[in-house]
Amino acid sequence: MLARRNQHIMASEIRLIFNKIVGRSDIVDLTVGLPDYDTPDYIKEAAKDALDQGYTRYTHNAGYIETREAMSKKLKHDNGITADPESEVMMTAGGMGALLLANLVLIDPGDEVIYPDPGFVSHPAHIELAGGIGVPVKLKKANNFGMSADDVEALITDKTKALVLNSPNNPTGGVTPEKELRKIADLAEQHDFYILADEAYEKYVYDGKKPSFIGSFPGMMERTISIFSLSKSYAMTGWRIGAVAGPSEVVQAMVKLQEHVLAMPTSIAQKAAEAAVTGSQDCIRDMLATFSRRRDLITKGLNAIEGVEMKPPGGAFYAFPDMSAFNMSSQELVMNILDNTNVATVHGSAFGKYGEGFLRLCYAVSTERIEEALSRLDSYLHKLLR
Ligand SMILES: Cc1ncc(COP(=O)(O)O)c(C=O)c1O
């Protein structure tokens, strides 16, 4: 009954775990990929003001011009990206809304799109929905899960239309070094393909390192669709608001399509986003410092458990330890851990075939929860090695 385009679209396997833990208070839940912070007050106040001031109607399909202007300033200041608010910036329903539109306007049936594996499950789903052929590029533990330009080059064919980049990466926390990004940019120019730069975790890069944005490199604006999200940066996952910067012909095609899909993202969320990027950025510094401490805690704790091994992740808020010593599939391991310790994690294979052998643990939860999870894992996991 259903159209063929649905046939190969997979629901996220994270659901397998959600379904087992829903409504249970005895679970230490490290599955969900969202900050445990609430949206900062100055953003909520701006949303309330927007309601009171009557920002309750349809907006431009690209979003309010003043919101795009604020976003354009943020892009210049935070990301080094110069984008005209009139034609090269649009507001979207989260990063997700932007990713789908970008795939739909760029990909023809049969086009190949290279995407990170392990990676965010919606990337291959969007490629598929657009009729494209997803080509996974392995993010290797040996490279701290950064993308390697050589690995990308090996996958390029005359059908390659785009490459999805996501640094810092979900689920590994891997950050692609600037050197590799520059080489990847050269490849995109040589072989004439687009970059979809999913910058959802732009604010979460640790050890005082400055993130690099491929859309800011010379000559790259014309072939990079940079996708930003307020979800993780400002603890606004439920507001569904994001922004795109890219070449005007691509952005304008996305605006045209958005008109027929959503019309525009919610007016109040747009006003909240405008306030988020123009107000004090103390909340970002605060979350980064907190998550950095939690990262150190979980890295040390996991490495202290026999059979578990990982390097400190460079960004995002996920630990992705190597669990291959346990000699079972990552899904089996997740279920064993859940049934025996009530700690909920996600199997690496839920994020692509190259995620097998790893688990994802989200550490955007309280220190107490991390400590409790580590203690339960420590007392259980050694039994599996015997
Ligand atoms: C890598 C990545 N991209 C995009 C998104 C989508 O975020 P949103 O649609 O909330 O902006 C997520 C959410 O988890 C993500 O992890």
Image: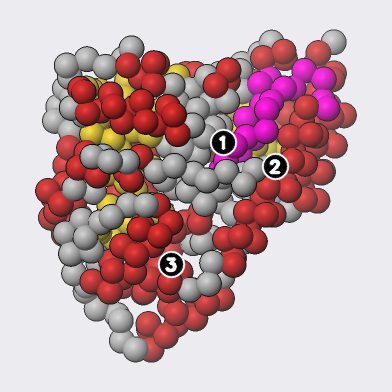
Is residue 238 rendered magenta in the image? no
| Tag 2 near tag 3, CB within 8 Å | no
Relative placement, left or right, of 363 versus 83 is right
Q: How far separated are the C-alphas under marks 1 and 2? A: 10 Å
Residue tagged 3 = 277
Judge the density around disc 3: few (<14), some (14-19), many (≥20) Cα neighbours within 10 Å: many
Image x and y of residue 275, in percent: 43, 74
Say if disc 1 is inside 8 Å of ligand 1.
no
Residue under the point 56% across and 48% down: 204
| Tag 1 near tag 2, CB within 8 Å | yes
Span of residues in magenta:
304-323
Judge the density around disc 1: few (<14), some (14-19), many (≥20) Cα neighbours within 10 Å: many
Reading the chain from its start, which is encountered first: label 1 or label 2? 1
Image x and y of residue 63, in percent: 25, 67
State whether the magenta stretch is mostly helix, strand or loop: loop
Q: Which numbered marker is on residue 173?
A: 1
Q: How far separated are the C-alphas under marks 1 and 3? A: 24 Å
